[in-house]
Amino acid sequence: MKISKKTSNHYKWGNNCDGWHLLASEGLSVIEENMPVSAEEKLHYHNKAQQFFYILKGEATFYIEHEKIVISQNEGIHISPQRPHKIANYGNEPLQFLVISQPRSHGDRVDL
């Protein structure tokens, strides 16, 4: 089955951020997300889900536990379960990225 943002479930989150569920199964989630400039999410962790973020456009700033990591276009980062983290867009252009979660992260998030 062909999958695109046009055929996927769209949702809003955070401060005017967009997400599209490209794949949403019990064991795997693939989401494309857009974050406007100056947007950031709350620090949180997932009990079971590991996540892989891949930057399609822009530059993402991650806070993972007590470390700040900047990830640029065509780079990615893996986050293990139970590791506190958040993503922010401190760049000067919208941020576009994929987040792949295994198993899916919805319902598995704990805000700090």
Image (cartoon, helix red, strand yellow):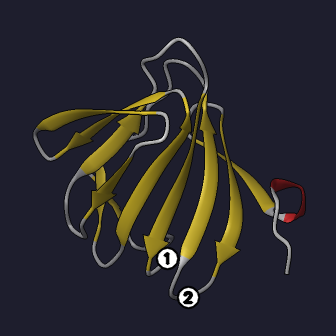
Dot 2 crowding, Cα within 10 Å, few <14, some 14–19, many 20+:
few
Residue 62 left/right relative to 107: left
Seen at 30% across and 59% down, the residue is: 78
Q: Does residue 69 appear to the left or right of 21 in the view shown?
A: left
Q: Which residue is mark 2?
A: 26
Q: Position of residue 39 (x, y in %)?
A: 50, 26
Residue 28: mark in rendering: none
Q: Quadrant of the N terminus?
A: bottom right
The mark found on residue 104 in the picture is 1
Q: Residue furthest right?
A: 6
Q: Does dot 2 land on a helix, a strand or a loop? A: loop
Q: Secondary structure at mark 1?
A: loop
Upstream in the sequence, badge 2 or badge 1? 2
Residue at the bottom extreme?
Answer: 26
The amino acid type, in three-letter code, at marker 1 is Arg
Q: Residue at x 89, y 55 (%)?
A: 6
Tell which of 58 and 109 is nearer to you: 58
Q: Is residue 30 visible?
A: yes
Is residue 43 shown to the viewer in this render?
no
Task: Provide residue 95's location: percent of width, then percent of height.
Answer: 56, 31
Q: CA distance from mark 2 to mark 1?
A: 6 Å
Residue 42: quarter of image:
top left
Instruction: Identify the residue shown where x is 89% and y is 64%.
Output: 7
Q: The disc labelled 2 sits on which kind of residue?
A: Glu
Q: On screen, 111 above or below 110? A: above
Query: Are the residues at dot 2 and dot 1 in contact (C-beta closer than 8 Å)?
Result: yes
